Image: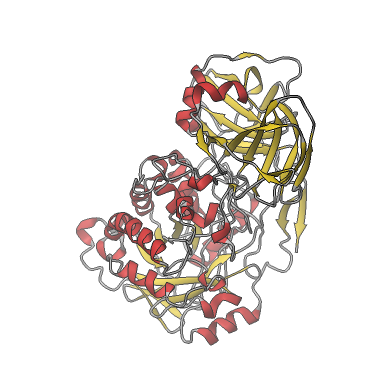
C-alpha cells in the first residue's frame, strides 16, 4: 500500500470516563496508528449480551437499540457499557480478521469500531469494490459471529491517518471542488457512494438482527467547519437510506461545539484525560453519557525522526498504558495482559483465553539478482500521455478518466542547453531531475531551483515526481493535487510539450513487469531509478516475517504483487511487515523499485525494527 497522508498519523486510542484501551491493527501504510473507542456510562451496571444466544430466530425482540438516558447507555432498555477498540478491516489481511477479533474478546472488549474508506471502495469513479480485504459485509458479520458489537464510522470523510482522509482523489479533478461541504460536485459524489454503501450496512444494524449499534456522522467536522449545513446533509444522507441506530459525532475539545448536529450524541477525542475536557462536554451536551471516541495514546512518526512512544506516567488512572495492545503483526504486548486483568475485574467474570500468536519466520538473506532500469521499462510497458502543459496526477487520462491516485509520475520534455530551472513551488511533493539519464538533483517544497548543466544539441529533461501522500486532516484538503500542479520554468520560460508517464505501479503493471524484456544481472554498482527482483523460496507453511532493507536508499517493495509500502534510509522505520498469507510455498517474487542507490540483498527477520524510541509526555 502507498503510505497515508500527512497530519497526526497518530493515535491509537480509546476510553472514556474511567477506562480506555487501545488496539492496534496492521500499520500497512507505514506506522499508521489507529484510534479506539471505549467506555461509556460511569457508574452503570455492566450488561453484556452473549452473541451465541442471539441467533436469528431469537432476534424478534430487538426494538429499542442503543439509547442514552441521563448518564448511561441502555441497550434494549438495560444499562450497557461500551468497552471498545478499533479494528480497520482495510488495514488487516482478511485471513487475520478473526484472529484480531478473538484477541479483542480475550482482552475484555465487547465493541469494535471501524471506518469505511471511500477511496478504496470507489478507486475508479462509479466502479465499486467490496471484495476480498474490502468485503465490509463479511467483516461485520464476522464481528457478530465473534460476539462483538459494532460502531460504524462511514464518513464520507474518515481522517484515520489515511490519504485525503479517505476521500477519493478523483474528486480533485474539479478545479472548484470544495470537499466536506454541500458543494454540488461533492454531495453528488457522496450520494452515489452512499447509494452503494448503505444497502450493505442497513441489514446489519442491531434492529435488523445485526451487530451495528451506532453510526457516526462524518468525523471531527468541528475542526473543519467550513459549511454550517454540511453535518445536517450527512445526517439526512444516512437517515434517508435506512440508518435507524443511534447517531454519534466525534470531535476534539476545540471542535466540539462546531461539530454538533441535532439528534446525534456528541463524543470527544483527546490525548490526556483532563478534568476540563469532560466538564466542557457537559456544557455542550447536558444529561448524556460521556463517551470518548478516540483516546490518543500513541503518536505518528515522521520520516527522519524518532519512533515516538507516549510515556504512561500520569495516565494510569485512565488507560494505564501507552501505545498498542497488539503489535502490527498481532503479537501481544504487556499492555494486553494488564488490560485483560483490569477488564476482567470490572466485568466480574472470566474472559476467553487469549489465542495463540502467529509464529514469525526469519528466512535470512534474499539476493536481488536482476534489475531493469526505469528508462528501459518505459517504451514497452507504458503509453505516455502527450500534453502541451503539465498535468497534475489526478487529471491524467488514466483509470477510466478517474486519474492517478498514488505513486509516481514522470514528466519528459526536450530542452536545448542548460541554465536555471525553477519550480515556482509547483512540485508535489518531490521531483528527481534528470538530463537524459544523468541525475541532476531534486526539487521539493524546500528546494525550488536547480542549475542544469550545459550541453550540445537537444536533450531530454525528465522530472520523476513522487506523491508522498495527501494530508488527511486540516483545512488544506482542497489543495492536495499531486505531480506538477503548474508551470516549471527554464531560464524564465515555461516548459512545454510533455510526455507524461503514469507510474502508479498497480498489480497489473507489476505482473506485466515480470515478462518485460531487458532484465539483467545486477552489476557491482548501479544507481536507479530501477526495478530489482529476487526470489524467496519457502519450504513449509509460510509465516509472517519482516523485510529489512539495509543498504538501500529509498523506494517501494512488492511481494507477489502486494505493495508492502515505502522504505527510506533516513528512517525511523527499518523494516516492513510481510504477512504470511501474502506468501506461498515455493517461489515468492520480490520486486523493489529503488529511486537511487541499491543494495544487493535484503534480510527477512522475525522481529520488527521501528527505529530509535523517544518517549513523549
Location of residue 257 with respect to 167 vertically, above or below: below
- Residue reaching furthest top? 521
From the viewer's perspective, tell me whether residue 469 is left or right of residue 80: right
Q: Position of residue 508 (x, y in %)?
A: 45, 29
Quarter-of-image position of residue 278: bottom right
Q: Position of residue 531 (x, y in %)?
A: 61, 24
Could you say which is closer to the camera, residue 228 or residue 9?
228
Considering depth in this image, is 441 or 130 the residue closer to the camera? 441
Q: Nearer the viewer, residue 445 or 145?
A: 445
Q: Is residue 428 above or below residue 433?
A: below
- The residue located at (38%, 52%) in the rendering is 143
- Quarter where residue 493 is shown: top right
In this view, the residue in front, 391 or 261, is 391
Q: In the rendered image, which quarter contains the N terminus?
A: top right
Looking at the image, which residue is at 57% across and 41% down? 329
Quarter of the picture containing the C terminus is bottom right
Where is residue 72? Give x, y as percent. 44, 79
Is residue 229 something that shows in the picture?
yes
* x 69%, y 22%: residue: 601
Amino acid at each position: 500500500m502507498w503510505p497515508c497522508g500527512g497530519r497526526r498519523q497518530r493515535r491509537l486510542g480509546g476510553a472514556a470516563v474511567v477506562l480506555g484501551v487501545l488496539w492496534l491493527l496492521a500499520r500497512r501504510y507505514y506506522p499508521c496508528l489507529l484510534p479506539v473507542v471505549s467506555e461509556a456510562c460511569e457508574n452503570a451496571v455492566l450488561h453484556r449480551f452473549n452473541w451465541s444466544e442471539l441467533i436469528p430466530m431469537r432476534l424478534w425482540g430487538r426494538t429499542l437499540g442503543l439509547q442514552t438516558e441521563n448518564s448511561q447507555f441502555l441497550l434494549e432498555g438495560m444499562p450497557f457499557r461500551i468497552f471498545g477498540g478499533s479494528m480497520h478491516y482495510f488495514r488487516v489481511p482478511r485471513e487475520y480478521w478473526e484472529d484480531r477479533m478473538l484477541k479483542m474478546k480475550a482482552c475484555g472488549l465487547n465493541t469494535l469500531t471501524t471506518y469505511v474508506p471511500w477511496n478504496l471502495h470507489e478507486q475508479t469513479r462509479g466502479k465499486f469494490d467490496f471484495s476480498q480485504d474490502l468485503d465490509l459485509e463479511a467483516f461485520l458479520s464476522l464481528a457478530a459471529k465473534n460476539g462483538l458489537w459494532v460502531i460504524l464510522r462511514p464518513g464520507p470523510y474518515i481522517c484515520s491517518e489515511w490519504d485525503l482522509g479517505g476521500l477519493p482523489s478523483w474528486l480533485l479533478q474539479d478545479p472548484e471542488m470544495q470537499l466536506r461541504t454541500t458543494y454540488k460536485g461533492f454531495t453528488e459524489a457522496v450520494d452515489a457512494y452512499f447509494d452503494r454503501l448503505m444497502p450493505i450496512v442497513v441489514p446489519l444494524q442491531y434492529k435488523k438482527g445485526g451487530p451495528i449499534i451506532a453510526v457516526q456522522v462524518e468525523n471531527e467536522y468541528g475542526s473543519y467547519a467550513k459549511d454550517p449545513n454540511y453535518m445536517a446533509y450527512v445526517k439526512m444522507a444516512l437517515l434517508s437510506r435506512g440508518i435507524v441506530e443511534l447517531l454519534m459525532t466525534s470531535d476534539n475539545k476545540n471542535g466540539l461545539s462546531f461539530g454538533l448536529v441535532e439528534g446525534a450524541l456528541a463524543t470527544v477525542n483527546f490525548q490526556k484525560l483532563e478534568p476540563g475536557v469532560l466538564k466542557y462536554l457537559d456544557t455542550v451536551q447536558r444529561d448524556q453519557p460521556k463517551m470518548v471516541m478516540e483516546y490518543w495514546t500513541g503518536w505518528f512518526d515522521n520520516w527522519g525522526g524518532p519512533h515516538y512512544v507516549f510515556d504512561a506516567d500520569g495516565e494510569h488512572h485512565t488507560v494505564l498504558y501507552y501505545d498498542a495492545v497488539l503489535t502490527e503483526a498481532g503479537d501481544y504486548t504487556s499492555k494486553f495482559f494488564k488490560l485483560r486483568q483490569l477488564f476482567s475485574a470490572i466485568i466480574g467474570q472470566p474472559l476467553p483465553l487469549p489465542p495463540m500468536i502467529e509464529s514469525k519466520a526469519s528466512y535470512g538473506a534474499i539476493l536481488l539478482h536482476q534489475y531493469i532500469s526505469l528508462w528501459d521499462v518505459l517504451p514497452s510497458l507504458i503509453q505516455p500521455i502527450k500534453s502541451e502543459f503539465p498535468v497534475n496526477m489526478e487529471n491524467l487520462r488514466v483509470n477510466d478518466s478517474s486519474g492517478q491516485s498514488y505513486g509516481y509520475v514522470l514528466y519528459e520534455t526536450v530542452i536545448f542547453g542548460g541554465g536555471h530551472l525553477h519550480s515556482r513551488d509547483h512540485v508535489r511533493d518531490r521531483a528527481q531531475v534528470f538530463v537524459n539519464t544523468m541525475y541532476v538533483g531534486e526539487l521539493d517544497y524546500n528546494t525550488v531551483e536547480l542549475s542544469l548543466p550545459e550541453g550540445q544539441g537537444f536533450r531530454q529533461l525528465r522530472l520523476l515526481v513522487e506523491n508522498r501522500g495527501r494530508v488527511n486532516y486540516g483545512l488544506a484538503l482542497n489543495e492536495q493535487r499531486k505531480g506538477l500542479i503548474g508551470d516549471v520554468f527554464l531560464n524564465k520560460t515555461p516548459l512545454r510539450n510533455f510526455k507524461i508517464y503514469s507510474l502508479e505501479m498497480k498489480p497489473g503493471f507489476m505482473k506485466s513487469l515480470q515478462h518485460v524484456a531487458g532484465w539483467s544481472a545486477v552489476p557491482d554498482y548501479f544507481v536507479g531509478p530501477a526495478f530489482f527482483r529476487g526470489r524467496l523460496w519457502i519450504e513449509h507453511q509460510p509465516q509472517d516475517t519482516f523485510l529489512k532493507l539495509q543498504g538501500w536508499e529509498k523506494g517501494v517493495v512488492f511481494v507477489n504483487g502486494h505493495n508492502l509500502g515505502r522504505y527510506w534510509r533516513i528512517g525511523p522505520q527499518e523494516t516492513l511487515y510481510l504477512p504470511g498469507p501474502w506468501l506461498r510455498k515455493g517461489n515468492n517474487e520480490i520486486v523493489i523499485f529503488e529511486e537511487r542507490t541499491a543494495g544487493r540483498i535484503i534480510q527477512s527477520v522475525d522481529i520488527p525494527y521501528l527505529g530509535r524510541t523517544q518517549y513523549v509526555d
